[in-house]
Amino acid sequence: MPWPDPVILTGDHASLEPLSPAHATDLAEAVADGELWRLWYTTIPAPDAMAADIADRVARQAAGTMLAFAVIELESGRAVGRTTYLNLDPANRRLEIGATWYRRSVQRSAINSECKLMLLRHAFETLDCIAVEFRTHFFNHASRRAIERLGAKLDGVLRSHTRLADGSLRDTCVYSITAAEWPAVRRHLTERLARG
């Protein structure tokens, strides 16, 4: 059985639904807002590669190796980004939240905080995870600050960890939140969303 099962998570600002080919048009438009695929320190598909990227992620979901979500802005009803449960380890009840991006116009909005809260709540309170990881490029300072604002702690840096498409090597910062830390992180995120 795949772990975790596909699920729809809904908040006040956004919902997360399993990624499907139906999201391709919205996500191709979303990635163009800020030309996100041009960021050298991350891997985000260009608009003309979006359908193939979605097909790859749907196939990985069918194989049980990830669960990718489209981020749906409730106000517009359109997909404005993507996030993923990956590096799934059901035996040890661990997973990573990653491969996340949002169109520029919704970055640093309540949508990202709410989506992280929904994903973390599901991971800890439904899937009974003992830890949730976040990984990012050492030079992706915006992502590192966002992860730290969640309350995740830096576990370490995997040096020369992966090779990027241009052949350069990525140093990967690994962060995590443990089950013991989750109640304080949940309160922090809930208060932050309440303050707007």
Image (tube, rainbow, N blue to C red):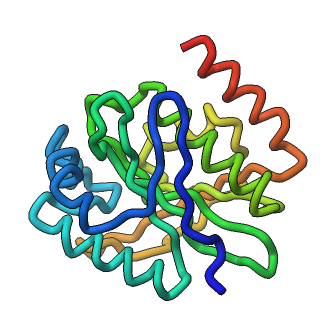
- Going 17% across and 39% down the picture, which residue do you hit? 33
Q: Is residue 21 above or below residue 15?
A: below
Position of 171 compared to 150: left or right?
Answer: left
Locate residue 42 relative to residue 192 in the image: left or right. Answer: left
Q: Percent x, y for residue 37?
A: 21, 55
Looking at the image, residue 20 sits to the left or right of residue 181; the answer is: left
Q: Quadrant of the C terminus?
A: top right
Q: Residue at x 61, y 50 (%)?
A: 119
* Picture coordinates of residue 182, whole percent (x, y): 81, 43
Q: Nearer the viewer, residue 62 or 87?
A: 62
Closer to the camera in the image, 139 or 144: 144
Image position, residue 35 (x, y; %) = 16, 45
* Residue ranking furthest to the right: 180
Relative to 43, does residue 161 appear above or below in the rendering? below
Please name whichever residue, 74 or 101, is drawn nearer the observer in this view of the structure: 74
Q: Quadrant of the N terminus?
A: bottom right
Q: Position of residue 175 (x, y in %)?
A: 66, 53
